Amino acid sequence: MKPIKDMLLKMRHDLVHEIARRSKATTEPGAQDIGDILDSVSEERTRELDMILTDREKRKLLQIDDALDRIEDNTYGQCEECGVKIPRARLKVLPFAKFCVECQEKNEREEKYTREEPEEGIRKVPMGEVEE
């Protein structure tokens, strides 16, 4: 269990530093050169992408913290859905896994079918097609 805990702690350390770096880069005022609208759009898009990545990293950090809590509670390595022992190979690849492969697949299928559909009257048009 110690090697997995050490791996989780290292992942947590690296994520905390990456989140801090992105947050600092996003909030630092950049050199305000006089540029055209494309420069402004490009900078804004970069900031949005950084924010999306930071949100993903924060979710991963929560998963890591949860796994560390489960180690302390001696529940780590057990599927939270069915109670079966999660294979060690899966935990080495995904050390913050909460579910066995079967339950994870079942949860993903259910999530896929319960996602909200677009509002009625709104239709996605594939790129390149023009509605007339």
Image (cartoon, rainbow, N blue to C red):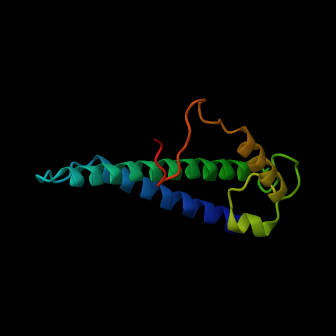
Residue placed most toward the observer, 90 or 53: 53
Q: Which residue is drawn at the image coordinates 20% and 49% (left, top)?
A: 37
Please tell me whether residue 91 is drawn above or below residue 119 in the rendered image: below
Number of residue marks: 0
Farthest left residue?
Answer: 34
Q: Position of residue 103 (x, y in %)?
A: 82, 51
Farthest top residue?
Answer: 120
Relative to 112, 51 lies left or right: left
Q: Position of residue 127 (x, y in %)?
A: 48, 53
Q: Quadrant of the N terminus?
A: bottom right
Residue placed most toward the observer, 81 or 3: 81
Q: Which residue is drawn at the image coordinates 56% and 62% (left, top)?
A: 11
Relative to 34, 94 lies left or right: right
Q: Position of residue 34 (x, y in %)?
A: 10, 52
Q: Which residue is drawn at the image coordinates 66% and 61% (left, top)?
A: 5
Q: Position of residue 56 (x, y in %)?
A: 52, 51
Relative to 9, 76 lies left or right: right
Relative to 108, 103 lies left or right: right
Please tell me whether residue 51 is drawn above or below residue 116 in the rendered image: below
Residue placed most toward the observer, 103 or 111: 111
Q: Quadrant of residue 95?
A: bottom right
Q: Which residue is drawn at the image coordinates 14% and 53% (left, top)?
A: 35
Residue placed most toward the observer, 11 or 49: 49
